[in-house]
């Protein structure tokens, strides 16, 4: 049976761009872009190019990149907040999560790093708001 391996790609928000890199640091490849969609496309293209170059130079390629693979994108809390700030306000997210707006702003700007339980509350809050919006149509 031939199945696609999932390659974890971490995405963060850096200054004014999204940045992406594979979790496996044996592949030194990064991409940046203004939008989440663009950085996802850019990192996949960069990885394909990089792996092809490694192959042509006879370099060792990490196992997850051998054969068919597909990206699995994992966003940091900062990236989640920056991505969703076009359509979810901190006020709305604060109401759903119980985390005050100033604290959410600190997380979005990288001044503070949320604990795992807080990261889960934020992600769950974004999902809850999204689910509520789906009920409108």
Image (spheres, helix red, strand yellow):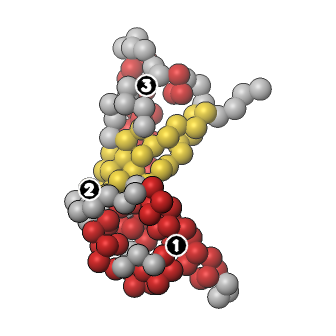
User: Residue 80's image quarter?
Assistant: bottom left
User: As drawn, which residue projects farthest toward the top?
Assistant: 58
| Callout 3: SS | helix
Look at mark 1 in the image and give the residue it sits on.
125
Distance CA(mark 1)–CA(mark 2): 23 Å
Q: Nearer the viewer, residue 57 or 134?
A: 134
Query: What residue appears at the point 53 percent right and 42 percent down from the top-left corner?
Result: 71
Quadrant housing residue 4: top right
Residue pointed to by mark 2: 14
Which corner quadrant holds the N terminus?
Answer: top right
Q: N-terminal of the two: label 3 or label 1?
A: 3
Residue 85 position within the rendered picture, expressed as x and y whole percent measured from the top left: 38, 75
> Of the residues tagged 3 and 1, which is closer to the observer?
1
Check disc 1 and report its element: helix, strand or loop.
helix
Q: Is residue 42 visible?
A: no
Q: Secondary structure at mark 2?
A: strand
Horizontal and vertical percent position of residue 19:
32, 50
Q: Position of residue 67 (x, y in %)?
A: 59, 25
> From what the image shows, is residue 22 above or below residue 104?
above
Q: Residue at x 61, y 82 (%)?
A: 132
Quadrant of the rendered image containing residue 89: bottom left
Quadrant in which the C terminus is drawn = bottom right
Q: Which residue is mark 3?
A: 52
Picture residue at 55% right of the left edge, 68% below the top = 124
Q: What's the distance in space between the residues labelled 2 and 3, CA to CA?
A: 28 Å
- Is any atom of residue 121 visible in this view? yes
Mark pair 3, 1: CA separation:
40 Å
């Amino acid at each position: 049976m031939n199945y696609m391996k999932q390659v974890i790609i971490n995405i963060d928000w850096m200054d004014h761009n999204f940045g992406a890199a594979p979790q496996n640091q044996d592949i030194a490849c990064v991409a940046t872009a203004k939008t989440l969609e663009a950085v996802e496309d850019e990192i996949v293209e960069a990885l394909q190019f990089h792996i092809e170059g490694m192959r042509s130079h006879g370099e060792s390629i990490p196992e997850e990149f051998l054969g068919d693979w597909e990206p699995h994108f994992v966003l940091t809390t900062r990236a989640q907040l920056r991505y969703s700030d076009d359509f979810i306000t901190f006020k709305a997210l604060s109401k759903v999560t119980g985390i005050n707006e100033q604290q959410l702003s600190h997380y979005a700007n990288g001044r503070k790093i949320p604990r795992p339980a807080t990261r889960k509350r934020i992600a769950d809050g974004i999902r809850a708001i999204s689910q509520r919006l789906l009920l409108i149509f």
